[in-house]
Image (cartoon, grey):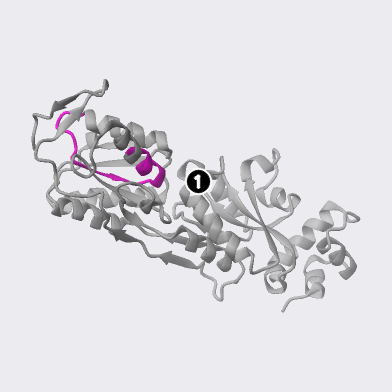
Amino acid sequence: MPGIREVAEQARVSTATVSRVLSGSKAVSEQSRTKVLDAANRVGYFAENRVMANIAVAYFGRPCFDSPFDTALWDGLSEAAAETQFNLVAINANRVRREGQSFTDAFRHAGVHAAIVRSVSSMTREANELLGEGFPCVVVADRESEGRVDRVYSYSRPTSVLAIQHLIDLGHTRIALGISDMIDSDHADRHDGYREGLENNGLKYDGRYVLQVPPKLEGGRQLLRHFMSMRKRPTAVFVADPMVAVGLMNEATRLGVDLPEQLSVVGFDDSKLRYMVHPAMSAVCQDAYMLGMQAFRMLLSPGDGPEPRKQVLPTWFDIQRSTGRPPEQPYRLLPDHSRIEDEEQA
């Protein structure tokens, strides 16, 4: 187990300087502090000795604390952190960095010794910059960022294919997709699974039935109004984001659209949100809580070999009461909330 002496040798400072840095003393230069913290991370001092230190969940952009995924992820991270002496903090990585400063220096200055990295595709360049610096971190729920770094994620494409197959087996041929406008590898999986499920059954991918919306309740309300007003409207929809799915189902209730009699809905669920709506929602599911647990534990357990580690958690399809056969007489819902028969049948 590495100790203060090993850290001092790596940093080429005295053991007294190492002790002052690790105790949080301000009686040490910033240069020495950085050298000691770098050395402590290199030899695995924090992980092996479980000393008090900060581990950050690093966001590149606005933290998504209103997201069911991030809520469940934080629950898992917090549970894992409670088993250690580490503090868990949230950081907007772009905001803590001064001009010309590396992410590593910015994190060290903020007292962060390792990070769980959360990123979306619009911020991949910044995330890649951090990963290229070799800062101790684990990437969670993303495969697009570069760098030789450990990762924990779920793979939802095959399960998304199953969800589309379920709708087709019920008799649906006009199936829409509602997807977040913040595309990451998770949402790309769901989009690809939707397309594959259609093509497996000889159905054409039609861009008119695909709509990107903000990953919020309002996005779901927008989806419901858009798809229900279309000529030759979809009779089923795969909503690949939890909050969007809830927003769509709530709007259906508000406008009197019966589910699944007039529209079948398959959503996505990171925890147990599918049981908190009416009717209970059929959903492609992942365990975001376990993603957080495993990401934190991976961060504290250095790998044995030169290759980065990868842990892929399973997803599954849970059939509930929001899916059924297509309506015999589908109607369109116009912007003024009036209803007319959808004459253009498949």
Q: Which of 345 and 190 is in front in this view?
A: 345
Query: Where does the magenta region start and end?
Result: 230-248
At x 35%, y 51%, the residue is 268
Q: Where is residue 321 shown, x and y percent of the image?
A: 25, 52
Q: In this view, does 24 lie to the left or right of 337?
A: right
Residue 207's image quarter? top left
Q: Which of 254 and 235 is in front in this view?
A: 254
SS at mark 1 in the image: helix
At x 43%, y 60%, the residue is 287
Residue 52's image quarter? bottom right
Q: Name the residue under label 1.
A: 124
Q: How many labels does the image show?
A: 1
Q: Which of 94 and 156 is in front in this view?
A: 156
At x 69%, y 67%, the residue is 42
Q: In this view, does 83 lie to the left or right of 248?
A: right
Could you tell me if residue 286 is visible in this image? yes
The local crowd at label 1, few if under 14, some if 14 to 19, many if 20 or more residues have their Cα within 10 Å, is: some
Residue 134's image quarter? bottom right
Q: Where is residue 322 shown, x and y percent of the image?
A: 26, 49
Which amino acid does the dot numbered 1 rest on?
Thr
Residue 247 colored magenta? yes
Q: Where is residue 118 shown, x and y percent of the image?
A: 53, 51
Q: Which of 285 and 109 is in front in this view?
A: 285
Q: Where is residue 160 shown, x and y percent of the image?
A: 28, 54
Could you tell me if residue 214 is visible in this image? no
Residue 219 colored magenta? no
Q: Is residue 33 left or right of residue 147?
A: right
